[in-house]
Amino acid sequence: MDKILNITDRLEDKKRKRNEKSHRQKAEALQRIVRCSSCRLSCAMCGSHFDVPDTVCPPASSYPDILPLCDSCGEEYNDFMAISEGKKGSDIFWHNAEWVSLWASWLEYHKAIEGFMNSKEFNKLLKKKN
């Protein structure tokens, strides 16, 4: 009887390995989302890359918290802030209600990512990875 293999144990082991692989892939994708969304080498809004040496990150800008923005997106952000604070109207035709909603949603997205990055669960995930 010792030579009879328990198929249940083998199936459970196979299922466990498949689940581990799936969880690892999901965790890696989540880490890429968080890492890429907070990359200091590209514009946080449009994604264009900054012309800086690979080892140097651009300094923190005066834009939302520490999000780096290219000049064009920085100007758009400043317009958005002025409009949303009621300081000025805009004479640019695309600065409509949907444009304001776009920028507001973008800011909320980055706040959500920052909140997740500061969560104990994400930090636990990073510790497991290392």
Image (cartoon, helix red, strand yellow):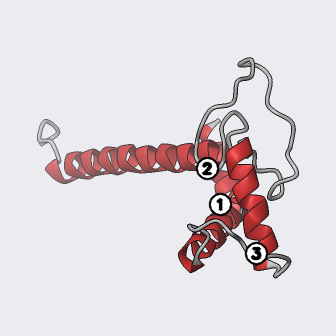
Sequence-wise first label, 3 or 2: 2
In this rendering, position of residue 121 left or right of residue 9: right
Numbered tag placed on residue 83 in the rendering: 3
Residue 45 at x, y percent in the picture:
62, 51
Residue at 35% x, 51% y: name it.
Answer: 19
Q: Could you tell me which secondary element the residue under label 3 belongs to?
A: helix
Label 3–label 2 contact, CB within 8 A: no
Q: Which of pointers 3 and 1 lies earlier in the amino acid sequence?
A: 3
Inter-mark Cα distance, 3 to 2: 29 Å
- The answer to whether one can see residue 118 in this image is no
Q: Quadrant of the C terminus?
A: top right
Q: Which residue is mark 1?
A: 113
Residue 34: mark in rendering: 2
Q: Which mark is residue 101?
A: none
Residue at the image point whose x is 76% and y is 78% from the top: 84
Counting from the top left corner in percent of width and height, residue 12 is at 26, 52
Query: Toward the viewer: 106 or 39?
Result: 106
Disc 2: CA contacts within 10 A as few (<14), some (14-19) or many (>=20): some
Q: Quadrant of the N terminus?
A: top left
Which sits in the foreground, 99 or 60? 99
Camera-nearest residue between 85 and 14: 85
Indicate the position of residue 117 as horizontal and vertical percent values: 70, 56
Q: CA distance from mark 3 to mark 1?
A: 25 Å
- Pick whichever of labels 1 and 2 is earlier in the sequence: 2
Measure the alpha-carbon separation of dots 1 and 2. Answer: 7 Å
The residue positioned 65% from the left and 72% from the top of the image is: 104
Q: Nearer the viewer, mark 3 or mark 2?
A: 3
Three-letter residue code for mark 1? Ile
Q: Are marks 3 and 1 in contact (CB under 8 Å)?
A: no
Note whether 76 is above or below 48 in the view shown.
below
How crowded pointer 3 is (Cα within 10 Å; few <14, some 14-19, many 20+) is rated as some
